[in-house]
Image: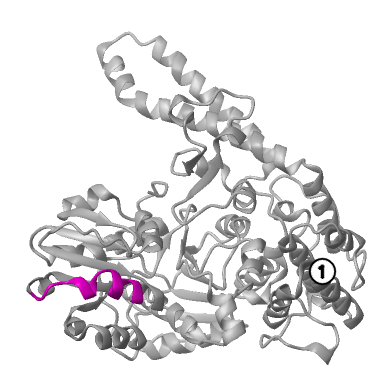
Amino acid sequence: MPPTAPPKSCTATITRLDQALLFKILDALEGTKTIVWDRFLMTEFNSTVSYQLLKEHNVVSHVCPVINPIVKKTDHILYIIPPYLHSTKELIESHLKKIPEIDRRKHRIYYVPEVSYVHREELISAIPWIDKHIYNLPMRWFPTDHSQFISMNLPTLPPVMLIYEDWNELYKCAKALRQLETQMEYPPKIIYKGKWSTTVAQILEQLRKTPSEEHVIEAPNVDEIIIIDRWLDLATPLMMQQTFSGVADEMYGIDIQSKIKFETENFYKGSKIPKSLQEKPQFDFYLNDEIYPELCDSHMMDVSGKIQYFVRECKEEELKYKSVESVAQISECVNSLPRVIKKREATTSYLQMTTLFMHDMSQAERLDYRKCEEEILENKFEDKIIPYIETCILNAEPLLKILRLISLQSQICNGLKLATLQAYRKSIVQGYGIEVLSWFLRLEMAGLIRCSDKSEKMSTYLPVNFTDLKKRFKLFSTEPPQVGDIARFYNGYVPLLIRILEEGEQADFMNWDFIEPSKNVPLKKKLQKDRLLFIVGGITRAEMGIIKERFPDMKYCCTTATITGNQLIEGLRE
């Protein structure tokens, strides 16, 4: 389960919504139930609902993955799968074809968030009797490790939009926003900026004219929905993050259950491994304690100081327990002892984690990479070939980091000159094989790598003029950033996405496109508006922390996915 969120937080609201949608389906079926899970969906559901809660709704058995043919006999069998063709085919072959006629009424299929025409036809053509047993389970949002952010867990949107131009991805976004606003008292004003956001807003406007999504819970109202494209700022996710959660995600990855997987020996290097982990080569660390929210948005250089504060706090609490005298005090201490022990253990783990992160960041290859990144940000080489990148290609270093640096250089200098682009492409093909050429070309189609002249224009998304924008928005700090300065989280750079939002907020978003709500919406004069922010295309964890601090009026902060530069580049591989 994710960190326990404050009762009025964005993640708490979405957890209530997801649970209500699932429990409504379960409670409508009398008797015992077995759920056959898709593996990825099971992980998503674990972020909002526990096995114990499912047990309370008469779910007595779980089967995962779908290809597992062993299913316990219960009164009802529910198949919960995503709208992917391979999942549908696995379900048909592993289960549906083997169901005897007498048991057919027990079986139900739920697509998350909804079934498409293609999948329904695939099912009916193979299993005709299943037609009336296919349902939707519209869980469109899931919590993240940040209490103010929720995600659609849709990292495929950029490659699908930019490579295949499949507008269905934007329809999913509009449906997800419609679901949120349906839980509110009235629909908000829609304000948007960017090519994708324009389409999402237009689809959302049309959805308002059709029968609405089901009202399941009472959610906090907002006055405005702010929609903005990730592709208005491609440079920021390509830079290495410097916050605790950003570094954790860059180096080890934080999954949708808010957990990190570590190698046991590597994590406890130089320290005693706990007995419970001595036989395990790997272990999962869940970010669901009271310490993580205090560390996640801190710069890595500040984390040790904060951990030391928690260490002192734990010691003070332990000393307090030793001085108790009355029965009432003893009772209070006994009740709070489990929390104190858990806090102390978490503090020790975070200290170990910070030591590991700092050690990894100080390795020669990482220092060389960061130096190259800083030189790109200073525009030292402009649009010419960078010697460090050339050396990495000659040494056959991981292609992912090479493509990330080339993409960053391309964004910072408004595209590479044709000779530089062709030289990079030729060297990569010679060093890594012709099969990687498609990856390079996909990055060009996405606009991550681009040519400065018009000769090799491939992206369908109009590129931004970074050279002009960095001056207009003062994206680079002229002096070393101080504590509390947001430029510190990206080595002296302020994310362009943040500056665009700041400019919009200062003008009350009057210079953005907008769609007014229907005339019957009550008008209320307020000194400060409550807003819902939606980033189409993904956001980094460092940006999440900045938004939380910079925009307190954003009651909901939503995105299609949490991303890193590596995930962005890797997503365009195939």
Residue 137 visible from this viewpoint: no
Give residue 66's position: percent from left, percent from top. 32, 64
Placement of 340 over or under 197, stated as above or below? above
The C terminus, quarter of image: bottom right
Residue 564 percent across, percent down from the top left: 63, 61
Compared to residue 463, the image places residue 40 above or below, namely above
**Residue 260 placement (x, y as % from top left):** 52, 46
Q: What residue appears at the point 49 percent right and 82 percent down from the top-left corner?
A: 170
Q: Provide the major secondary structure of the magenta segment.
A: helix
Q: Is residue 96 magenta?
A: yes
330 over 472 or under it: above or below: above
Residue lying at 55% horizontally and 35% vertically, measured from the top left: 264
Quarter residue 36 falls in: bottom left
Q: Quadrant of residue 188?
A: bottom left
Secondary structure type for disc 1? helix
- Residue tagged 1: 409
Q: Which residues are magenta?
A: 89-101
